[in-house]
Image: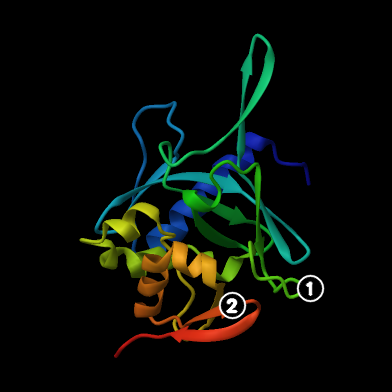
Amino acid sequence: MRELTPTEKGAIAEAKIYAAAVEAGIVVARPLSEGSRYDLIFDVGARLLRVQCKWANREGDVIVLRTRTSRHTPSGYVWTTYTTHEIDGVAAYCPDLEQCFYVPVEQIAGKLVTHLRLAPARNGQLAGVTMAGAHRLGAIAQLGERFAGSEEVAGSSPASSTPPGADIVVGAHAFRDRFGYWMELAAAGTDVVVTRHGRRRVRLSRAD
């Protein structure tokens, strides 16, 4: 079987992401003109998300999401990264898993590559670790309605969650910096466990 070209991979990834979003109940649109930094638009009810689509390979327990772009200039290729002014998030299709993921731009802005872990780090590290399970495409549809009237969540928080009943462990500093997001995540049914100096201290759960 011949190797796919980058253009073919991009087209397949976009098609897979489009289908996964529609299956999750997300209204999807495409820009009519070329040249945008985003490939699709997700309507999650309270807002529209500008989404860049990517092909992401699995390497062991990690999904490698390359978030750099390049353009050719008279001086050669120039490598750039995405910013919050250009897109709202990156959706990735992993062919090894046949699954799609969504990562808010705040978590990839300025990065050349982002790693989504399928299993906890062997050294037990939590800080700076992004778990793939927290970013499966489809969960943003569940939280979409909760964005209405909440500028803190809509403007600066990841629009994704884990399936109800699963725990998310987060450090105290990350919890403080994105309190609005963690609160919405807990309200959607995912318990959030807050650690300090590696010890579990607080659990945030849905009130009802």
Q: Is residue 119 above or below residue 177?
A: below
Which mark, residue 80? none
Task: Compute the Cα span from label 2 to label 1.
Answer: 17 Å
List x then y, in percent, for residue 17: 49, 53
Q: Is residue 7 above or below residue 91?
A: above
Which residue is at the front of the view, 41 or 143?
Answer: 143
Q: Residue at x 64, y 66 (%)?
A: 127
Residue beneath label 2, please?
196
Q: Is residue 59 left or right of residue 66?
A: right
Q: Residue at x 47, y 78 (%)?
A: 163
Quadrant location of residue 189?
bottom left
Q: Report if residue 115 is visible in the image.
A: yes
Q: Report if residue 24 is visible in the image.
A: no
N-terminal of the pair, mark 2 or mark 1, is 1
Helix, strand or loop under label 1: loop
Q: Residue at x 50, y 57 (%)?
A: 102
Q: Residue furthest bottom?
A: 208
Q: Please state which of the two labelled residues, at mark 2 or mark 1, is closer to the viewer.
A: 2
Which residue is at the front of the view, 69 or 25?
Answer: 69
Residue beneath label 1, please?
123
Question: Amino acid type of disc 1?
Answer: Asn
